[in-house]
Amino acid sequence: MNSKIIKQIRQRIAFLENHRDELIIDADAHISSIEDMTPNDRNNYLNNSNYYHGKPISAEDLLMEMKMAGVDMSLIWQNPAVIHYGADQDYNFQILFRANKYIYESSEKYPEKFIPAGWTDPKALGKNLAISLVEKCINEFGFLIIKMNPAQNQYNIDSEDVVTLFNKIVELGGIPAFHFGGDTPYTSAEGFEKLALLHPEHPVLGIHMGGGGPSYNDGEKHYIKARELGLRRSNIYFAESAKRDTHIESDLITYQLAGKPFCDHIFCGSDAPYGRESWNFGGYRQMFESLIDGINHTDKRVRANPFLFSRAVSQKYMGGNIAQFVIDGYKKML
């Protein structure tokens, strides 16, 4: 890492430390460079007023949504719906590199609004180029978190190439993150646990905490497996997003009852643009208000522990937990 990147990281640490107890942070948001879109994607972005799944948003679009939603910062990474891979792995590397570069440039432009995170893909790029992209994301852009999405490109979460990339990210001081949902068979709880056991003292982040858009029946099983997994492996952290609100609430109650360190391991997210920040964080706020009113809550665990939640506790889930996670991660990286 060069001195400029190190300075940016230290400034981000200082900002998060100064405002950790008040920030509302979206732990899962995807943005895209409009200039780098294909002509068809750019035309849809500019002229199609209807929503379609994964409709792209720019950094400035997200900032507008954050203002409406009362969100202070967002952890950002590229939007896979805008990445159209081809047969050429070098080409795939270049378009994913540009997508990651846009994340860095957006965080540089809005340093107190965005926490940048990277993305690599062992299938589309091949193992060697995927490793090269990890190195660039961490060493050139200073990204703390590097994500892979086995569901998107159809490879098992615990495959040999993923294990190699997982180890490389840890070696460089980064934190591996994964789309961890019940929407495909590629991100099983068993596979995710195998990865967590590779470096049991090193954090790993599961995005969606078993959600990600599965059917009701498949989702139910995966949600519960994810909930149990996080209580079994203390190095696993979760961003709640793209998941049934009833299960999110049950996760929060379960982990708050479990106490430390587990109650520090859940972050609230929206999965923007797949979900709206204003909708999700409006829902989170109302959910926590109901949990704070423990005596009248419908869950018997909360009624039996009516002071389990407070506004300070809710702020941790809505921002404080991920702020501390990033602070700790950056300090170890440096």
Image (cartoon, helix red, strand yellow):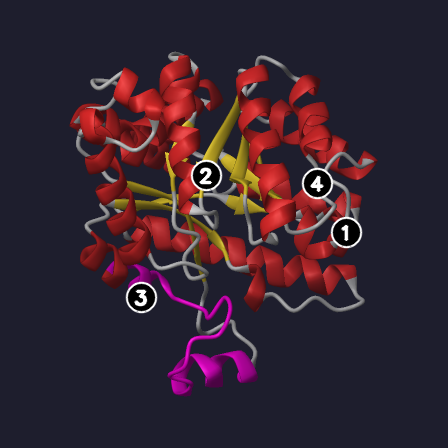
Q: Using a 10 Å C-alpha cutoff, classify the residue at mark 2 as few (fewer than 14 neighbours), some (14 to 19) or many (20 or more).
A: some
**Amino acid on which the number 1 mark rests in the picture:** Lys
Reading the image, the residue beneath label 3 is 61
**Amino acid on which the number 2 mark rests in the picture:** His
Q: CA distance from mark 4 to mark 2?
A: 35 Å
Q: CA distance from mark 3 to mark 4?
A: 31 Å
Quarter location, residue 222: top right
Q: Can residue 37 be seen in this snapshot?
A: yes
Q: CA distance from mark 3 to mark 1?
A: 30 Å
Quadrant the C terminus occupies: top left
Closer to viewer: mark 1 or mark 4? 1
Task: Looking at the image, tell me whether mark 3 or mark 4 is earlier in sequence order.
Answer: 3
Q: CA distance from mark 2 to mark 1?
A: 32 Å
Reading the image, the residue beneath label 2 is 247
Circles 1, 4 touching at the beta carbon (< 8 Å): no
Query: Is residue 39 left or right of 74 when viewed as pictured?
Result: right
| Residue 303: percent from left, percent from top | 27, 22
Task: Looking at the image, tell me whether mark 2 or mark 3 is earlier in sequence order.
Answer: 3
Q: Using a 10 Å C-alpha cutoff, classify the residue at mark 1 as few (fewer than 14 neighbours), some (14 to 19) or many (20 or more).
A: some
In the rendered structure, find residue 131 and report the number of the disc placed on it: 4
Q: Which residues are magenta?
A: 39-63
Reading the image, the residue beneath label 1 is 123
